[in-house]
Image (cartoon, coloured by chain):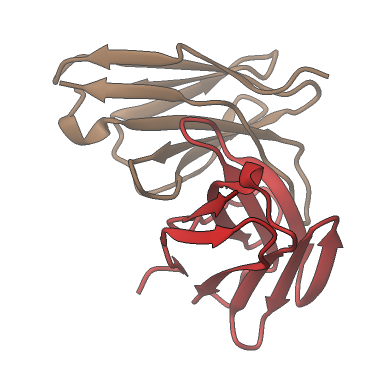
Chain colours: A brown, B red
């Protein structure tokens, strides 16, 4: 069974640029959630995708957008980067469930905005 | 008031000690309670998952939930240096809803 993978591992961008981060779900998982983890903080929910549709969004501006593909892999796009976007970006995959569902995280992409 | 409060530590204990990690939460709609362990510069790893109030044990780890007081605990027995990490509590309202994380408690177990 393959776990959640993310690419790239690290990324350095300058303010105003755009970035795309990628995530491959754990085998069989069709739900992907993205989280932002600033230094010294817990992860904050950005949005979730299920069957290629956005299925919930946290308190993040529209310049944070995403996609999910038919193979359940996913992308997070951030436009007009700001210094405060520097963080570890985590994706988590899960199976949909009406009860609590375990979310399995990838290693994250560390984004630095200069 | 934040939905989930967790003392960030750091917490330093000698090897073999019993460790108690705690969170409080304000949203009574939370029904599912996760504990994640995160090593430095890595993604969170699911440790324990409990539903509603009660205890759940897995090896050296015990998760405890008291919904009446909105209090979540994780106990680690016979702590090891390899347990040194940040521990994150993450309650959830229902399936497919977001995890709401605390800030995490940084634990160091000294050999």
Does residue B56 sit above or below A87 in this rendering? below
Nearer to me, A4 or B55 = B55
Q: Give the mark count.
A: 0
Residue A9 appears in which quarter of the rendering?
Answer: top left
Whether residue A8 can be seen here: yes
Nearer to me, B111 or A43 = B111
Percent across and percent down for residue B75 are 69, 66
Quick check: A26 left or right of B82?
right
Does residue A93 sit above or below B4 in this rendering? above
Nearer to me, A13 or A72 = A13
Quick check: B60 left or right of B73?
right
Residue A36 appears in which quarter of the rendering?
Answer: top left
Which residue does the image show at 55% across and 33% down from the upper left?
A: B43
Quick check: B8 left or right of A71?
left
Q: Quadrant of the C terminus of chain A?
A: top left
Q: Quadrant of the N terminus of chain A?
A: top right
Q: Residue furthest bottom?
A: B68
Does residue A55 sit above or below A63 in this rendering? below
Quick check: B110 left or right of B3?
right
Residue A93 appears in which quarter of the rendering?
Answer: top right
Does residue A69 sit above or below B61 in this rendering? above
Percent across and percent down for residue B8 are 41, 60
Which residue does the image show at 66% across and 23% down from the upper left?
A: A4
Percent across and percent down for residue B35 are 65, 55
Nearer to me, B3 or A47 = B3
Whether residue A100 can be seen here: no
Which residue does the image show at 72% across and 49% down from the upper left?
A: B47
């Amino acid at each position: 069974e393959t776990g959640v993978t993310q690419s790239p591992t690290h990324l350095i961008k300058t303010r105003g640029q755009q970035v795309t981060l990628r995530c491959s779900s754990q085998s069989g998982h069709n739900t992907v959630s993205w989280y932002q983890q600033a230094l010294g903080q817990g992860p904050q929910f950005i949005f979730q995708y299920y069957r290629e549709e956005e299925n919930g969004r946290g308190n993040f501006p529209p310049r944070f957008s995403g996609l999910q593909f038919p193979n359940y892999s996913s992308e997070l796009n951030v436009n007009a980067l700001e210094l405060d976007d520097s963080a570890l970006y985590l994706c988590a995959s899960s199976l949909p469930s009406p009860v609590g569902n375990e979310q399995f995280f990838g290693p994250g992409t560390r984004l630095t905005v200069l | 008031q934040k939905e989930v409060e967790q003392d960030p530590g750091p917490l330093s204990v000698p090897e073999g000690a019993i460790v108690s990690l705690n969170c409080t939460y304000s949203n009574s709609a939370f029904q599912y309670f996760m504990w994640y362990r995160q090593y430095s510069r890595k993604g969170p790893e699911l440790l324990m998952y409990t539903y509603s109030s009660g205890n759940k044990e897995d090896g050296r780890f015990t998760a405890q939930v008291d919904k009446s007081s909105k209090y979540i605990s994780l106990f680690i027995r016979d702590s090891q240096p390899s347990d040194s990490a940040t521990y994150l509590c993450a309650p959830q309202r229902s399936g497919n809803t977001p995890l709401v994380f605390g800030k995490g408690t940084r634990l160091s177990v000294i050999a």
